[in-house]
Image (cartoon, rainbow, N blue to C red):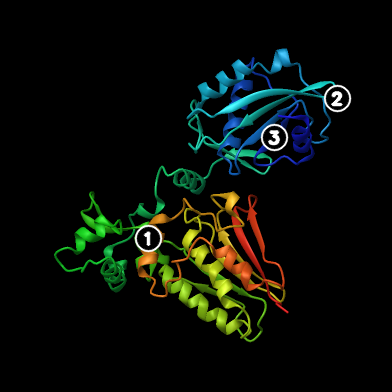
Amino acid sequence: MNKKKLLSLIKQREGTKLDFKLQIDISSESGKKELAKDVCAIANSRGGRGYLIIGIEDRTKRIIGINKLKSLDEEKIQQVVSSRCEPPIPITVEIVNIEGKDIGIITIFDGGQKPYQIKETGAFHIRRGSITDIMRKSELVAAFEENQLMTVETCQMINSSAEFLNMDLVARYFKNKGIIVNKENESFLLQSAGITFLDKRTRKVRCTFGGLLVFSDNNSICIPHNTIRIINKYNDKYPKSKMINGNLLSMIDIVEKEMYTLLPSKYPVYAVMESVKNSVMYREYSKIDKIIEIILTKNSIIVISPGQLVDRNNIFGDMGYSKRNMWIYDKLISLDEGKRFINDGNGIVRIKEAFKGKRKVRLINSTLEDCFKVILPMNTE
């Protein structure tokens, strides 16, 4: 790392991918545990590579420096991390001299094997702002899913039954695939497609998470966070808030009708629906405490989708959710007679074109709130 890059990092606040330490102690057991926990937490946090910078006062940012012979033995640091973290976390150790003082930099790379845990305790750590904490269940699920170690959509929902399914939707899906459902093949088709599963303990047929999302009109009983909330601060003639549930396609259809009712006739509703469609398709469904929100104000329309972008580099090209909810994508693209998902991948481009030469569309990928926001201008004049 060059001095310019290091000085730039020192000017920043501590966060999910940046931690300042006055010193580290790898000669004691407690110091080794602390180092492993800090590296694990940064590695598990989203946002690419992270940095542990040693020799800086975290509050004042005063450059103190380190004794590189005593506190920054690269071989020992590598050994501490590799022996205490599972799977091994890729790091590099460097020393950069600034103002005549040595500063240590441990760079923590995204090894594509999240979530990482501490071998000794089994704990999974993560950064919340500048604080190191234990990962929550939803964060663990998201990490496993992001690295394709599991698929949330095909997880089994024990509190469900096949009676939850809208069989007309199921039949339409298979018909569009060139398959006719009948009594003889129904059970086999549902299970082979990952829509249902046989509970071996009770011998009853249950639904998968994705099966409920796509094919159930009453999935909120099992998945209450599959909700879209419209918050109306714009049109006084209509209710201030409305909650929308149902199968994913019906939710999109209902929101579209609401937008045409609430918004002026000349407003590009399709731009709003592009944001809503992508939120429904690609939101992080493992976040059970978050719902999709559409906030209408006098100045803007804000569509908030739970979960950050998977591929942050694509934020200005497409929605960048290339690794998320592919099972759902396959089902919706087959069911949607309006062909709204055929051109999926250029949603942001189409949204921006709707306001070209008018007001700017804002995109916010929030690490702090763990969500993706599309902010559309209300006044397009």
Instruction: Tell me whether circle 2 and circle 3 mark residues in contact (CB < 8 Å).
Output: no
How far is disc 2 from disc 3 in space, using C-alphas? 21 Å
Q: Residue at x 49, y 59 (%)?
A: 282
- Mark 1 lies on residue: 330
Q: Residue at x 42, y 44 (%)?
A: 148
- Describe residue 221's horizontal placement relative to residue 90 as left or right: left
Give residue 299's position: percent from left, percent from top.
72, 74
Q: From the image, which quarter does the C terminus lie in?
A: bottom right
Asked which quadrant contains residue 61, the reply is: top right
- Describe residue 155's horizontal placement relative to residue 267 as left or right: left
- Mark 2 lies on residue: 99
Vertical placement of residue 6 versus 215, above or below: above
Q: From the image, which quarter does the N terminus lie in?
A: top right
Closer to the camera in the image, 198 or 97:
97
How far is disc 2 from disc 1 in space, using C-alphas? 57 Å
Q: Residue at x 56, y 24 (%)?
A: 81
- Describe residue 82's horizontal placement relative to residue 212 as left or right: right
Q: Determine whether the residue tagged by mark 2 lies in a helix, strand or loop.
A: loop
Mark 3, other Cα within 10 Å: few <14 / some 14–19 / many ≥20: many
Give residue 68's position: percent from left, percent from top.
73, 16
- Mark 3 lies on residue: 19
Residue kind at label 2, given as amino acid type: Glu
Q: Determine whether the residue tagged by mark 3 lies in a helix, strand or loop.
A: strand
Vertical placement of residue 4 versus 240, above or below: above
Q: Determine whether the residue tagged by mark 1 lies in a helix, strand or loop.
A: helix
Q: How many marks?
A: 3
Mark 1, other Cα within 10 Å: few <14 / some 14–19 / many ≥20: few
> Which residue appears farthest toward the top when viewing the image?
69
Q: Of label 1 and label 3, which has the lower sequence position?
A: 3
> Which residue appears farthest toward the right when viewing the image?
99
- Describe residue 24's horizontal placement relative to residue 57 as left or right: left
Give residue 16's position: percent from left, percent from top.
65, 41
